[in-house]
Amino acid sequence: MAESLRIGQFAAACGVTPRTLRFYEERGLLPTPTRQVRTMRRYSPDLIPRVERIQQLQSLLDWSLEDIRAVLALEDQVATLRNRYHHSNSALNRQALLEEATTLTINQLTRVRQRLIGLQNLQQDLEEKLARYQALSTQSHTRGESC
Amino acid sequence: MAESLRIGQFAAACGVTPRTLRFYEERGLLPTPTRQVRTMRRYSPDLIPRVERIQQLQSLLDWSLEDIRAVLALEDQVATLRNRYHHSNSALNRQALLEEATTLTINQLTRVRQRLIGLQNLQQDLEEKLARYQALSTQSHTRGESC
DNA sequence: CATAATTTTTACGTGCACGTTAATTATGAT
DNA sequence: ATCATAATTAACGTGCACGTAAAAATTATG
């Protein structure tokens, strides 16, 4: 069982460099890996989607690493809520947390949809431009403009 | 007739700062404005869409200013092709130019579509996450967990 | 066990897209 | 004409997300 990877392999699997992983760790985006003999970092393959998610939010939404850190932190809290048997004690806290996570997700959705609209407009502009270019191109053909 | 604006007004109309406009000019994204008495820059409002286009390509596609400069330069060339009565002399050149512009536009469209797919996936992920959160939220309601 | 390959920490360097002075010159309003 | 605004050039500064180099320690391989 390859239950843990060293930084080089893990980085390759994520499509990033070791430097990037250490940087993410430093900024709180990745958990400090459990170092078995307090020497080298060990990563579970389970973490690969997390890194991919970081890159996704970075490239698709132009979020800063700090913003992404906050998002992931909240999601982590909700996840632990799911797993740990919830004492009714924390019921109030739980509600607050869920509300916060919900509004955050709604905000993300809003930004995603705005971007989608912008991209769709751009797509249309480009298609029209392409059509004009091709019209200009056939124009000179049908008129027999060769040299 | 407000046929030309000074940099402050023009920048405000575009939603950028004067510094940004001078920077774009320095990098060849904006034409060097005709300075009436060789003093202050004068911008025609016609240029507003160009600046907005720069910002659009920048924010939606993460293109560098150099990439954008190249795109705009090609489009400008095609535009002058349209306007200037085309000597059959340049017919060969014209074809090459149109082909170049066409493939460039196709590349842009490809990137736009890839981004659209990515964003649509992200949108779906977020919607599912939101549903889970709301399920967790109603869960505690229906069980009467109040304080 | 010797040696090559990886990883560690520390620290400085980089590329991009502007921001921010500062000193000087132009313009607009009274 | 004067005085507040606005613009000009030149230069240095900034924030972000890493890249890169160096020296020491660790791990894998023959």
Image (tube, coloured by chain):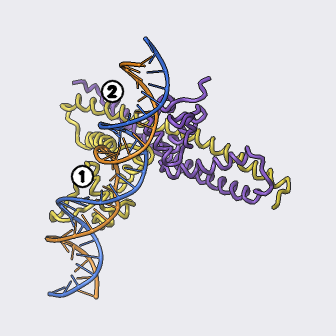
Chain colours: A yellow, B purple, C blue, D orange
| Disc 1 chain ID | A
Q: Marks 1 and 2, Cα distance to the nearest angstrom?
A: 41 Å
Which quarter of the rendering shows the N terminus of chain A?
Answer: bottom left
The residue carrying mark 2 is B142
Question: Which residue appears at 20% of the width and 35% of the height?
Answer: A87
Label 2 neighbourhood size at 10 Å, few (<14), some (14-19), many (20+)?
few
Q: Position of residue A90 (x, y in %)?
A: 20, 32
Question: Which residue appears at 53% of the width and 48% of the height?
Answer: B28
The residue carrying mark 1 is A26
Relative to A70, is A126 on the left or the right?
right
Q: Which amino acid lies under the numbered mark 2 shown in the image of this protein? A: Thr
Which of the 4 image quadrants contains residue A4?
bottom left
Above-or-below relation of A115 to A20? above
Label 1 neighbourhood size at 10 Å, few (<14), some (14-19), many (20+)?
few
Q: Which amino acid lies under the numbered mark 1 shown in the image of this protein? A: Glu
| Disc 2 chain ID | B
Q: Nearer the viewer, residue B43 or A82?
A: B43
Relative to B1, is A19 on the left or the right?
left
Q: Nearer the viewer, residue A34 or B58?
A: B58
Q: Position of residue D11 (x, y in %)?
A: 34, 48
Q: Secondary structure at mark 1?
A: helix
Above-or-below relation of D26 to B29? below
Question: Which residue appears at 52% of the width and 42% of the height?
Answer: B54
Q: Position of residue D29 (x, y in %)?
A: 28, 82
Q: Secondary structure at mark 2?
A: helix
Q: Position of residue B42 (x, y in %)?
A: 54, 33
Question: Which residue appears at 68% of the width and 43% of the height?
Answer: A128
